[in-house]
Amino acid sequence: MLLLLVPLQAFPLLLDVLGWRALIAQPVPLSALFLIASIRQAINRLLPVANIGGEIVGVRLLARRGVGGTAATASVIVEVLVTLIAQFSFVGLGFVWAWRAGDSPAAYGLLAGLTVVVSALIFMILTLRNGRVFFRTEQLAKRMAGRWLPRLNSPRGAQVDAAVRELMAQPVRLSASLAWQWAGYVAGSLETWLALRWLGYPVTPVESIVIESLTQAAKSLFFMVPAAAGVQEAGLIGSLSLFGLGPDVALALSLAKRMREILFGIPALIAWHWMEGAPNRGTVLK
């Protein structure tokens, strides 16, 4: 039964894709965007890229679909910010329900850490909306390595800044993207609910949201850990303890999630290799 978690992953990922598509001005086939999102997710979760390699590849693949490089970069940057906002609001909901379930030192520790992360996120949003982050980064790179990287003479940084500001000034698109992303997190808790039920430790849908949200909180706090190795397990142990479930259940649930990540991600990595193998392969998927 646990193998059914693999195709089930397509549902929350599709909701995420719809949130991403809301930020892309140019039309992109949903199937192509779904494949690119699958590749982004697989790279971030299966490769040691500190959760940013997938975004870089996503920009490249989206540009190969005919979306301008600047627009593709801006869409991914803003989509990541919207995803973080959706994630933190989802985590906040989980914390509220967790406190109602009982005191948890682990939950309080995660909340303290996330307060710092949320403050950094707010600062990042304000900077991207009002500053010239990429222009200044480009200027710094020119001073440090301009001699060896002549391409840096282009005004790409300023263009990306302008594109990001333009996207962040469109509340309708941002709201639509946020709604889809938030729905994706709620749908993702279905995996936890079903996996525990199939393992013989059923929980309620609300409890599955608490478990998923606290695990997401741990992953956000320690996002630099490759593949969230050990972080996911610690988050599950802490969240499952709220409902009287021991570390053995947490480990079984974590293994089920790891299995799904591998079985869903490997085909995506193979597709990425195939798309990068020839110049025109990235444009044949309709």
Image (cartoon, rainbow, N blue to C red):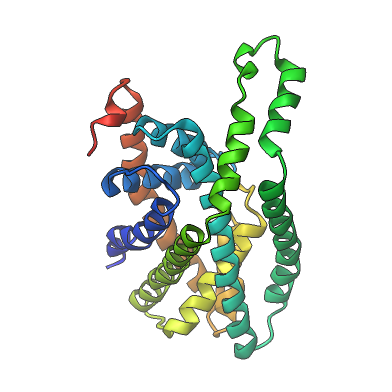
Q: Compared to 41, does 245 lie above or below?
A: below
Position in image of residue 30 (x %, y %) = 29, 49
Q: Does the image show residue 226?
A: no
For the point 27% across and 47% down, which residue is it?
31
For the point 41% across and 54% down, which residue is it?
22
Toward the viewer: 193 or 118?
A: 118
Toward the viewer: 251 or 113?
A: 113
Q: Quadrant of the N terminus?
A: bottom left
The number of numbered badges drawn on the structure is 0
Toward the viewer: 233 or 113?
A: 113
Q: Quadrant of the C terminus?
A: top left
Q: Does the image show residue 76?
A: yes
Toward the viewer: 88 or 49?
A: 88
Q: Compared to 2, does 45 lie above or below?
A: above
Horizontally, residue 262 falls left or right of residue 147, namely left
Position in image of residue 208 (x %, y %) = 46, 78
Horizontally, residue 264 falls left or right of residue 173, namely left
For the point 62% across and 73% down, which residue is it?
238
Quarter-wise, where is residue 107 in the image?
bottom right
Quarter-wise, where is residue 121 in the image?
bottom right
Position in image of residue 280 (x %, y %) = 28, 23
For the point 75% across and 26% down, which residue is it?
140
Horizontally, residue 248 falls left or right of residue 135, namely left
Position in image of residue 139 (x %, y %) = 73, 25
